[in-house]
Image (cartoon, rainbow, N blue to C red):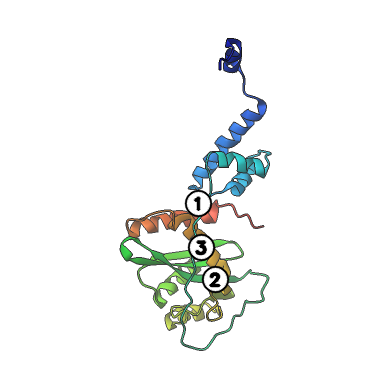
Amino acid sequence: MQIPRSTYYQWLSRQPSQRELENQRITDLGYDIWLSSNKVYGYKRIHVALKRQGLTVGVKRVWRLMKAIQAQSIMQRRFRKPVTQVLYAQRPNLVKHFDDMSGIWVADVTYIQMPGGSHLYLGTVFDPEARKVLSHKVSTVRDGQFVADILTDALKHHDAPRYLHTDMGSEYTSSTFDEVMQKHQIRHSYSKKGHPYDNARIEVCHSILKRELIHPNQFSSKFELIARVVWYINWFNTKRINLIA
């Protein structure tokens, strides 16, 4: 099949349409946003970020353009937290029916698998109202001193909450942790035994961190992991777009 020479030259001299120019600009900006999020953002958060930059663009258009360049959010299977084993009586959940989360902190420890079969623990204190990590620590040991140190660090930089909610793991029911709670007159609220998702807010925080940072990457050492966790939590607290109002 032969194409007339005039048609070929018309194609060479053709100027891109306004729509094509707009698409290219959206694509370039969206790609930069995706890279700056460490490839975490999907099209919905890219759409929010573009709107913050003053662009009027539909979410479906962003989805189509980002899909074309394979700028998609890192997604991994959900981590299922093992049920905490406790051998003593249930303690009360004091915040179960609270709608107002002001004055309430939550805390938890999550397990991180490392290459070679080793593992680490990440402990976190989280403010569900501000949606910010207040303090964290990575350790090879999961005990009362570990979680007491994390809470103490949070209390150095923030006023003490009225309540702190945790599961009934042995580290959180230890005398070492209880001493810090009593010293600052914080009331301790507990998840029901066998129901770790009573502490859903921090479970979600840890799930996001694992999906966006831990699972997609290989860390050669504890020190590399700690450095990346510090970076991620700073980004999570200050820049990550939250799609929930």
Circle 1 Cα neighbour tier, 10 Å, few/some/many (<14 / 14–19 / ≥20): some
Which of the two discs, 2 and 3, sits closer to the camera?
A: 3
Q: Are marks 3 and 1 in contact (CB under 8 Å)?
A: no
Residue furthest bottom as drawn: 89
The disc, 2 or 3, on the residue closer to the chain's N-terminal end is 3
Residue kind at label 2, given as amino acid type? Val
Residue furthest left as drawn: 116
Question: Is label 3 in a helix, a strand or a loop?
Answer: loop
| Disc marking residue 78 | 3
Question: Is label 2 in a helix, a strand or a loop?
Answer: strand
Residue at image location 57% in from the left, 42% down from the top = 67
Front residue (pair 102, 191): 191
Residue 12 in the image, given as x and y percentages of width and height: 57, 16
| Disc marking residue 223 | none
Q: CA distance from mark 3 to mark 1?
A: 12 Å
Residue 77 in the image, given as x and y percentages of width and height: 50, 60
Q: CA distance from mark 2 to mark 3?
A: 21 Å
Q: In the rendered image of this protein, does residue 11 appear above or below residue 32? A: above
**Which of the image's four quarters has the N terminus?**
top right
Residue at image location 49% in from the left, 57% down from the top = 76
Front residue (pair 124, 116): 116
Q: In the rendered image of this protein, does residue 42 appear above or below residue 190? A: above
Question: Is label 1 in a helix, a strand or a loop?
Answer: loop
Query: Which residue lies under the disc numbered 2?
Result: 106
Circle 2 Cα neighbour tier, 10 Å, few/some/many (<14 / 14–19 / ≥20): many
Q: CA distance from mark 2 to mark 1?
A: 26 Å
The disc, 2 or 1, on the residue closer to the chain's N-terminal end is 1
Left or right, 67 with respect to 151, comes to right
Query: Which residue lies under the disc numbered 1?
Result: 74
Residue furthest front as drawn: 1
Left or right, 53 with respect to 167, comes to right
